[in-house]
């Protein structure tokens, strides 16, 4: 494992669903990239015991957190605390790249 990564080396696409790659994972934290092609959606879901954030690196999307729905673009951070429903749809015409953190890491 390296302590230095360029996120662009881990960006990708999948025509059938959101593309995911892991940058770092320990018992305490998972950090990864979620990449959504135009029109792709990560359906709303919850993490019962984990907090999560999305940081928009590239693109724009529509984010749902609880009862709130809002457009967010590059430089925006979106938080969903444990147990709060959340999801995202790429509403732009280019790739949506999200830095994602989940703590503690899933399955731990």
Image (cartoon, rainbow, N blue to C red):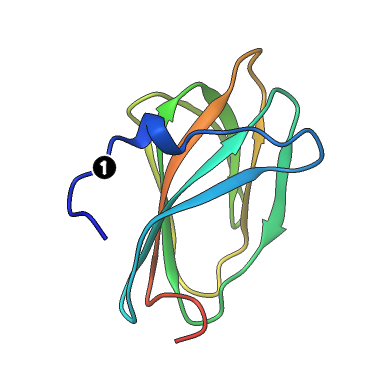
Q: Position of residue 104 (x, y in %)?
A: 37, 77
- State the residue lying farthest toward the left: 3
Is 66 in front, or is 14?
14
Q: Position of residue 53 (x, y in %)?
A: 40, 54
Above or below residue 101? Residue 29 is below
Number of on-image labels: 1
Q: Is residue 37 left or right of residue 98?
A: right
Is 94 in front, or is 7?
7
- State the residue lying farthest toward the right: 16
Estimate how packed mark 1 is, as few (under 14), some (14 to 19) or many (20 or more) residues with alpha carbons within 10 Å: few
Dot 1 corresponds to which residue? 5
**Picture residue at 76% right of the left edge, 43% below the top:** 17
Res 29 quadrant in image: bottom left
Is 105 in front, or is 11?
11
Q: Position of residue 99 (x, y in %)?
A: 40, 43
Quarter of the picture containing the N terminus is bottom left
Above or below residue 90? Residue 104 is below
Q: Is residue 45 left or right of residue 21?
A: right
**Picture residue at 32% right of the left edge, 28% below the top:** 75
Is 85 in front, or is 96?
96
Q: Is residue 6 left or right of residue 99?
A: left
- State the residue lying farthest toward the front: 1
**Picture residue at 32% right of the left edge, 75% below the top:** 26
Q: Position of residue 32 (x, y in %)?
A: 43, 52
Secondary element type, mark 1:
loop
């Amino acid at each position: 494992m390296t302590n230095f990564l360029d996120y662009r080396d881990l960006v990708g696409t999948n025509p059938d669903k959101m593309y995911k790659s892991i940058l770092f994972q320990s018992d305490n934290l998972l950090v990864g990239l979620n990449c959504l092609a135009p029109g792709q959606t990560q359906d709303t879901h919850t993490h019962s015991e984990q907090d999560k954030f999305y940081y928009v690196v590239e693109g724009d999307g529509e984010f749902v957190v609880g009862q709130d729905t809002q457009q967010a673009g590059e430089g925006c951070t979106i938080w969903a605390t444990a147990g709060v429903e959340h999801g995202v749809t790429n509403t732009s015409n280019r790739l949506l790249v999200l830095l994602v953190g989940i703590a503690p890491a899933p399955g731990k």
